[in-house]
Image (spheres, helix red, strand yellow):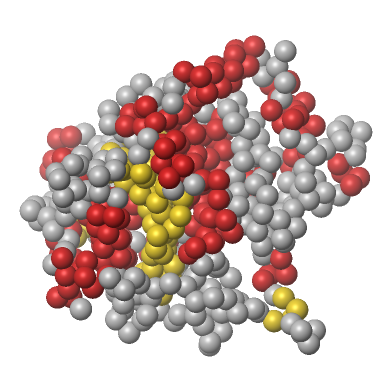
Amino acid sequence: MAISIYSTLLPFPKLTVSSRKYHPFGGSNPSNLTIPTTSTVSTKALHSKTSDSLTSIITELEKESLNKDDQNQRQEDINTTHHERRLSDVWRELHGQDDWVGLLDPMDPLLRSELIRYGEMAQACYDAFDFDPFSKYCGSCRFVRRSFFPSLGMAHHGYHVSRYLFATSNINLPNFFKKSRWPKVWSKNANWIGYVAVSDDETTARLGRRDISIAWRGTVTRLEWIVDLMDFLKPVSGNKIPCPDRTVKVESGFLDLYTDKDETCRYSTFSAREQILTEIKRLVEEYSGEELSITITGHSLGSALAILSSYDITETGLNVTADGQVVPVSVLSFSGPRVGNVRFKERLESLGVKVLRVVNVHDVVPKSPGLFFNEHVAPRLMKLAEGLPWSYSHVGVQLELDHTHSPFLKQTSDPVCAHNLEAHLHLLDGYHGKGHRFVLASGRDPALVNKASDFLKDHYLVPPYWRQDENKGMVRSKDGRWIQPERPKLDDHPEDIHHHLKQLGLASDH
C-alpha cells in the first residue's frame, strides 16, 4: 500500500524569526524570514469541507494521480539511492566523467539529488542577497561569511564558505546590479555576486572527495537583463584571459562582468576573475594530497559566469596539482544563456570541462543570445556564419524539463515563472525520464516554488511571493523607534591575495 510522503510530515510547524529548523519538505528557510505555513493562513480555508490542511490536499491529489507504475518508480528510486549505490563510489560518473550518458533518461536518482543539492546552493545566492532598494545594504549579502549556510537553514549541506565574490557595478548591466536609494550605503560601486565553499570532513567522506564549489548569483526577478546584453562576441584574450586562439569568443557583457574592477572600491578592487583564480589556487594547494573536485553552479546570468569561470580555471591550469593530478571541473547550470561561439565550445570541451545544463523548454533565456545563428542551424551554414559577432553555440549536455508536466503548476505564459530556479528544482524532483509521469521523488516542498513567483495552482493555498524579511528588516531600538539595524561588515579580500596574484602573473595589474 502506497503511503504519501507528505502524510508523515505534518502538521507544519509555525516558523518564527528565531527558528532555524530545516523546512519539513526539504529546501531551506532563512532564519530571519517569516515563512507562510498552514499556521499563518486562513483557518477557515484550511478547515474547509474539502480538506483539513494543505498537506491533505496534496495527499489526496497524490492518491488520485499516482498509479501502480508511479509507486513502483518511487520505490525503485528509494531502493537505488539507499541500498545499491553509494555516492562516494560513483561521484565521477555523476560529475560528468562520461558526459552523463545513461543517467538522464531514465533519470538517475543519485544524479537528481545531486542536481537539486547544487541547485539549492545556487538558490542560496538569491535567498541571501539584499535586493531591497530601501535598504542601505542593498546589493550585499545579508549574512557574514562564517554564518552563511546556518543562517539559511542549510548547515546540513556540510560546506563552509571560504570567500565571498564581488563585482563592480560600473558596467552596462543595470538590471543585474541592485543599488540602494539611500545616500549612506555599504558600497556605492559593488555588488555581491556569489561565493566559494568547501565541503567539510564529514561531507567529504560521503561525497568521496573534497568538493570545492563555486556558486554565482543570477538575476533576482526580472528578465530585463537580456536586453542589456550587447549580443556582441569578443575574443576571450581581449580581456587578458589566456587563450591560444583569438577566434575563441564570448558575449562581451559576460566578459566585462567577469574581468572589470574598480580600484577605488574596497570590494571590487579585484575583479571577479582575480578573486576566483586566487581562491581556487589557494584551496587546491591547501588540500593537496586529497581527492578533489571543482563544481561550479549558477542560475540565469550566474550560469554564464559559471561556464566562463570554468573555462578560465582550466585554461590557466589551476585544476592541475603540483604533482600533476588533474582535478575534474564540472558545471551544473540552470536556465543559462548561450555564452560564446562554436570555437569557445570546442575549446572548453578540449580542456575537459563537463557541463550539464538544466533548462525548462518554455524558458526564453536559454534561447538567447544567438536567436538566428546557433547550434540548431545546419553545420554548413554555421561554418559560414562562424566569423559573425552574433553566432553562438551552447556548450555541454542539456537536460530538458517541461513545467506543463507538473500537476502542481499553473498553465501560464509568464516568462518569469518559466525561468524561476525553485520551479526548476521542483521539476527535477518530479522528472524520471521522457515519457514518464511526473512523480515527486523526494517530496521537496512544492510551496518553495511560490517563494518568489505566482506559479503554484491556487488550491494549494500557498500565497505568491511569500518570502520576505520580517518587517522588511526593521527592528525596534531601545528607545522604541523602528530603525534599520547595523550589520557586520562583510569580508572583502584575503590578505594573501597579492601573493597569489603574483604567482599567477597578475600582480602587474595592480
Q: Which residue is more in the foreground, 477 or 483?
A: 477
The quarter of the picture where the C terminus appears is: bottom left
Residue 418 seen by the camera: no
Q: Residue at x 86, y 33 (%)?
A: 51
Q: Which residue is more in the foreground, 432 or 378?
A: 432
Q: Residue at x 49, y 57 (%)?
A: 125
Q: Is residue 447 above or below residue 237?
A: above
Residue 277 image offset from top left, x and y in percent: 25, 60
- The quadrant in which residue 312 appears is bottom left
Q: Residue at x 46, y 29 (%)?
A: 110
Q: Which residue is more in the foreground, 158 or 215?
A: 158
Query: In the picture provided, is 354 more to the left or to the right than 316?
Result: right
Residue 232 image offset from top left, x and y in percent: 25, 59
Q: Is residue 495 above or below residue 254?
A: below
Give the number of callouts.
0
The quarter of the picture where the N terminus appears is: top right
- The quadrant in which residue 99 appears is top left
Q: Residue at x 57, y 38 (%)?
A: 426
Q: Is residue 483 above or below residue 415?
A: below
Query: In the picture provided, is 23 more to the left or to the right than 194?
Result: right
List the single residue furthest toward the left: 244
